[in-house]
Image (cartoon, rainbow, N blue to C red):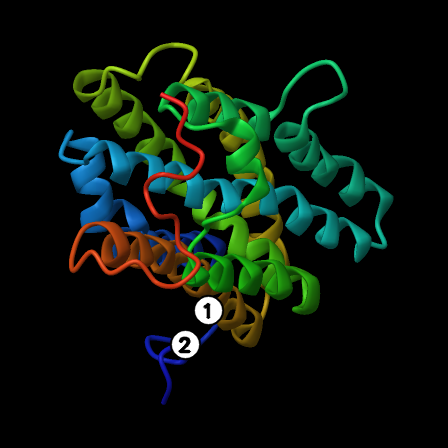
């Protein structure tokens, strides 16, 4: 029995029971428990470590609308496309007003990085690219139920955003209303996204096989998030071994 098959149920669960199963996955596996986040939120990160986090997390942020565009391309339902496309708009913004990607580049500027350098994705760790690209492919290739279930890590995101805002404001000089705008906006956007996604998954995962697939998709996504932090921690904290192609702590610094 492999990792994804472990802990599966013997019979189909009610919607309430299945939601509890999904939330338990987050309680056990969400990346808020990773040592790097504890270090970051507690004020223990060096300037280089904060910047490395901003650079690598940007690769994830800029890939989210590509992931959602891939999902949209597979939707036969116009109603589902209308609802889902707001996710692309939330991250890309429009011509005159920035979305999540531009707000993340404001954070990059606030920590002393050249936004153009960050946007180039030069210096992103190989493992970050591997994990994020795997997520985009998952959403592109797997059944719609699995693809949507993978997005349900948003169930657990508001708590980590709130903790991050509090921790960064308390511990770092760069943290202010402007630099943390990305996280504050996600506190408004994520609840509507996850409310729809959770309801859709609970209604469509109506067999044991589908419930298991949806749960395994959510496990996969928590692994994607955890792997990114493992790479950061290994490269910039302990043992501090930056792999070939990883950011060297100097390129793109303007402060």
Q: Is residue 115 above or below residue 216?
A: above
Screen quadrant of the N terminus: bottom left
Q: Earlier in the sequence, mark 1 or mark 2?
A: 2
The residue at 79%/36% (across/down) is 82
Q: Is residue 19 above or below residue 82?
A: below
Residue found at the very far bottom of the displayed protein: 1
Please give left or right for residue 169 compared with residue 95 in the image. left
Report the Cα–Cα distance between label 1 and label 2.
5 Å
Residue 88 versus residue 80: which sits nearer the camera?
88
- Location of residue 56 in the rendering, given as x and y in whole percent from the top left corner: 43, 46
The quadrant where residue 17 appears: bottom left
Q: Residues within 10 Å of mark 1 (few under 14, many from 20)?
A: many
Please give left or right for residue 41 compared with residue 178 in the image. left
The residue at 30%/58% (across/down) is 242
| Residue at which label 2 appears | 4
The quadrant where residue 39 appears: top left
The residue at 46%/51% (across/down) is 124
Residue 190 versus residue 245: which sits nearer the camera?
245
Q: Secondary structure at mark 1?
A: helix
| Residue at which label 1 appears | 216
- Location of residue 121 in the rendering, given as x and y in whole percent from the top left corner: 54, 45
Please give left or right for residue 148 compared with residue 48 in the image. right
CB-based contact (under 8 Å), mark 1 and mark 2: yes
- Location of residue 141 in the rendering, given as x and y in whole percent from the top left corner: 69, 68
């Amino acid at each position: 029995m492999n990792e994804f098959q472990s802990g599966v149920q013997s019979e189909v669960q009610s919607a309430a029971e299945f939601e509890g199963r999904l939330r338990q996955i987050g309680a056990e596996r969400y990346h808020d428990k990773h040592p790097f986040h504890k270090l970051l939120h507690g004020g223990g990160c060096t300037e280089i470590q904060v910047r490395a986090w901003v650079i690598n997390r940007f690769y994830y942020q800029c890939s989210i609308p590509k992931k959602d565009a891939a999902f949209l391309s597979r939707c036969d339902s116009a109603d589902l496309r209308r609802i889902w496309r707001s996710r692309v708009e939330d991250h890309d913004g429009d011509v005159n007003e920035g979305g999540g990607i531009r707000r993340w580049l404001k954070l990059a500027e606030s920590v002393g990085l050249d936004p153009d350098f960050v946007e180039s994705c030069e210096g992103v760790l190989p493992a970050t690219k591997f994990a994020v690209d795997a997520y985009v492919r998952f959403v592109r290739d797997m059944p719609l139920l699995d693809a949507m279930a993978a997005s349900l890590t948003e169930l657990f995101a508001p708590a980590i955003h709130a903790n991050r805002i509090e921790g960064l404001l308390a511990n770092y000089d760069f943290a202010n209303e402007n630099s943390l705008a990305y996280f504050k906006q996600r506190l408004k956007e994520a609840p509507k996204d996850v409310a729809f996604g959770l309801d859709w998954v609970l209604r469509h995962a109506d067999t044991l096989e589908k419930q298991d697939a949806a749960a395994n998709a959510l496990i996969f996504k928590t692994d994607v998030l955890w792997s990114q932090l493992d790479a950061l921690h290994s490269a910039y904290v302990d043992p501090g071994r930056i792999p070939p192609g990883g950011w060297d702590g100097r390129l793109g610094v303007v402060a």
